[in-house]
Amino acid sequence: MKVLKLSAMILMLATMVACLPDNDSDYEKIVERDNRLLRDYLDRNGINAIENPLGFFYQKVETNDIGNQIVNNDVIGIYYEIRTTDGQLIDSYFDENKRPRLYKHNDGGLVPRVINFASGIAKEGETLMIYSPSYLAYQQYSFEQLIVENSNLVIKVKYAQVFDNDEVKAMEQEVIEDYLTDNELEDFEITDNGIFIKIIGEGDGEKTAASGDIVAFEFELKQLGEDTAISKTNNNSPITARVGEQGNLDFLNQVLKGLKAEQEIEVYVPSHLAFGGSTQVFPFAIRRDLFLRGALGISARPYEPIHFKAKIKEVR
């Protein structure tokens, strides 16, 4: 059997290394080309925007003088629309009746990174128009018909709210509760730290999993409400984990305790007990592709609950 390695080391920062040019000279040419094309676009459309030293331009179209300035390591909820300068829509999420999408304002916090860079010049509640060269966006990355390599972007972003850790936890608990109610899912118990768990079956034998025991299990892990698995075992090929091992995801050490062989568990887990605040990616559609290319450390989205199902095969 394979050994489960759910280590914090997999929380690598997102990079676009695979998409970067081969040498400094090529990169300088890209910068020069993008800057020229972006300035031409602004001039041609009569757009009076402020130039940021990093290379993007911006306008504040909605200000909030009393809003808190966004600072490093803030968790920010935003609404946004991303288009190319040719007008092609890449992604839109601007329905403020929905919960905002979250990311952490730090190095590697977001793709396209220009949205993250612009966070530092915004206050909570402000809306910016951002005009970005490709080298601050998707660079040479392309994806089907959605993203064409070397595309300069026009992005509208509302930096709607800054969340503290307790607010993120409360929002995720509400997301899970709403999901269970909407789908008429019952018999889940909630732990003190916000895990929703259902245990199925009486189990086999007297051995129950405790700290230090090795548990073999089959599993499937998904983002809440989605059909495609983030990760799962192959048929009849369980993995093993030692209960309490530091490298395990936090929730795993908790939900495996007390289980017996042949029991099944289904759990809904808030992100702080799973993959945490990993790099955010817009649009969501390209996340798995970046993961498969090695440009992302994990496939799970940040600040969203996960759905985990497992069948215990052995406890020893």
Image: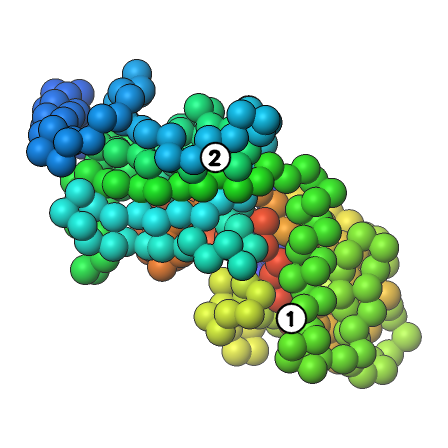
> How is the rendered protein coloured?
rainbow
Q: Nearer the viewer, residue 287 or 244?
A: 287
Tell me if I can see residue 310 in this picture: no
Image point (31%, 29%), residue name:
58
> Is 292 situated left or right of 235 in this image?
left
Give 51 or 214, whichever is nearer the viewer: 51
Q: Is residue 169 visible?
A: yes
Residue type, mark 1 in image: Tyr
125 horizontally vs 49: left or right: right
Residue 280: where, in percent of width, then height? Answer: 46, 45
Q: Residue at x 63, y 39 (%)?
A: 163
Q: Where's residue 231, x and y in %?
A: 51, 63
Outermost right residue: 206
Q: Along the horizontal axis of the image, is 292 left or right of 200?
A: left
The disc label shown at residue 179, or none: 1
Dot 2 corresponds to which residue? 126
